[in-house]
Amino acid sequence: MSALFQPLQAGALLLPNRILMAPLTRCRASADNVPTELMATHYAQRASAGLLIAEATMAMPGNGAFGNEPGIHSDAQVAGWKQVTDAVHAAGGRIVLQIWHGGRACHPYYNDGAQPVGPSPIAITNNELRTPDGKQPYVTPRELRDDEIPAIVAGFGKAAANARAAGFDGVEVHGANGYLLDSFPTRRSSDLSGPYGGPLENRARLLLEVLDAVVGELGGDRVGLRISPLNSFNSMIDSDPVGLVRGLARRLNTYQLAYLHVMRTDFLGQQQGDVLTPAREAYEGVLVGNMGYSPAEAASAVEGGLLDAVAFGVPFIANPDLPARIKAGAQLNPADPGTFYTPGAAGYTDYPFMQ
């Protein structure tokens, strides 16, 4: 596993190893979307990761998609995240914040009755919303008007500035999994024409405008981007995922980002294919892969040059000391899916460290 323990320069961030913690929604923030002391403990426990990518966090109010997910748009939220970053840094770690807009995956249940927005009035049909009152179907979004887009772009820029004020080492822009910034480039969720529809150059416009705003605040070397070209989660299927990833990767080279984070497979298994090879061929910067890697496969991907680092999700939930376990060849704790989204410490801060 030696390749995973080589340092990596990812933009301005010097990572001591190539085992990253993927962003994981856990719904442990307060009802006002303020990060908690329990979250600080959780992230600090996992500070031995080469980089912690904190969970999807609302860039602006009114776009919640889960309930009890954190935000970064209020002073209280900035202060809450500051206790998290202080704890991580005190433990010797590095942490960036994933900023997002839920788009058509937002729901009136969590947003004071407001209808969600998307590129087109096309609803999510292959998933349901989890609520304390049980699962509910997603609603049809209204089409986002072109004159509403500048405020969203500005909101992402402000979120990046707030992340800096909260002590984060950078941000990851969430452009994956059917949320707002993914729904524009992907054909199935968008039938727009005009400046944000049609060819990829137009469909990627919102994502690139957001990157312009975020990079303008932090510099490209403190910004990452996550994409999921193959993922059908939230009713997302593109007719040419390889062309999508190749086109985006080439365009991203001009930003000199800290990294590009590519989810390699489909949560639901509806689409198959290789999107990492074209990403590697087209992208000139640090490439991070994610989804379903064993330690051995991750090491092989890094040793062979396909990837520069691998982000682990579920293994980090159950193994706060995952790098040490991988290095020692130790057995991994199994995760308990029943506690992934429940409140409290159970299944969050109580997994044992290696003895």
Image: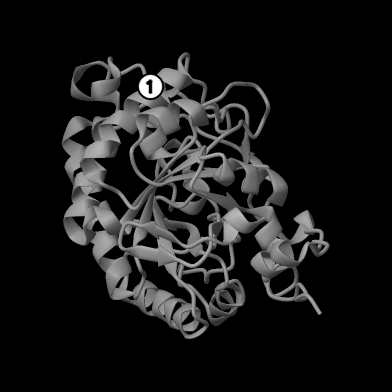
Residue at image x 64%, y 43%? Answer: 300
Q: Nearer the viewer, residue 143 or 338?
A: 338
Q: x, y (%) of residue 319?
A: 72, 66
Residue with the mark numbered 1:
190
Specify whether residue 25 is in view: no
In the image, residue 333 sits, relative to residue 247, either above or below, namely below
Amino acid type of the residue tagged 1 in the rendering: Ser
Asked where in the image residue 146 lies, by quadrant, the reply is top left
Q: x, y (%) of residue 247?
A: 33, 24
Left or right, residue 337 beside residue 223:
right
Residue at image x 28%, y 60%? Answer: 160
Q: Secondary structure at mark 1?
A: loop
Left or right, residue 126 beside residue 189:
right
In this figure, what is the number of numbered marks?
1
In the image, residue 31 sits, relative to residue 182, either above or below, namely below
Left or right, residue 122 beside residue 284:
right
Left or right, residue 72 beside residue 326:
left
Picture quarter with the C terminus? bottom right
Q: x, y (%) of residue 176?
A: 46, 39
Q: Nearer the viewer, residue 116 or 306?
A: 306
Mark 1 Cα-neighbour bin, 10 Å: few <14, some 14–19, many ≥20:
many
Specify whether residue 130 is in view: yes
Picture quarter with the N terminus? bottom right
Q: x, y (%) of residue 90?
A: 47, 85
